[in-house]
Amino acid sequence: MIEHVVQPIGFRHFDIENGIMRLNGKRIIFKGVNRHEFNCDRGRAITYDDMVSDVIFCKQHNINAVRTSHYP
């Protein structure tokens, strides 16, 4: 083993006070979208690159919540 790093991650505390959501003590504002797996050229036959492109697009536009209700 060359290197070992412990990085604690995850939800530790979530609350709503005076209408403000806080996650781990910091205010969080959800900026979300509905996502459907669809490509205008191939229909529902999307590729791995299509999915990566969607994630990059979401990150570039500060989207931090994605609704995928039609998928398991």
Image: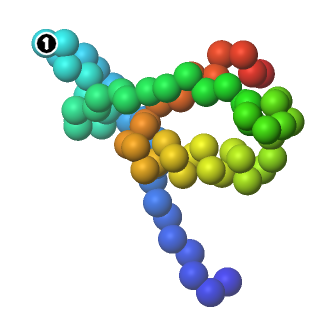
Residue 11 point in image, percent of width and height: 42, 35
- Residue extending farthest to the left is 18
Q: Which residue is mark 1?
A: 18
Residue 48 point in image, percent of width and height: 77, 50
- Residue extending farthest to the bottom is 2
| Residue under the image location 51 percent in, 71 percent down | 5
Residue 47 point in image, percent of width and height: 81, 47
Residue 67, quarter of picture: top right
Could you classify mark 1 by the number of other residues whose Cα lies within 10 Å: few (under 14), some (14-19), or many (20 or more)? few
| Residue under the image location 44 percent in, 27 percent down | 32
In the image, 39: left or right of 69?
right
| Residue under the image location 62 percent in, 87 percent down | 2
Q: Quadrant of the N terminus?
A: bottom right
Where 25 sits versus 35, above or below? Answer: below
Residue 17, quarter of picture: top left
- Residue extending farthest to the front is 41
Residue 9 point in image, percent of width and height: 46, 49
Element type at mark 1: loop
Residue type, numbered disc 1: Asn
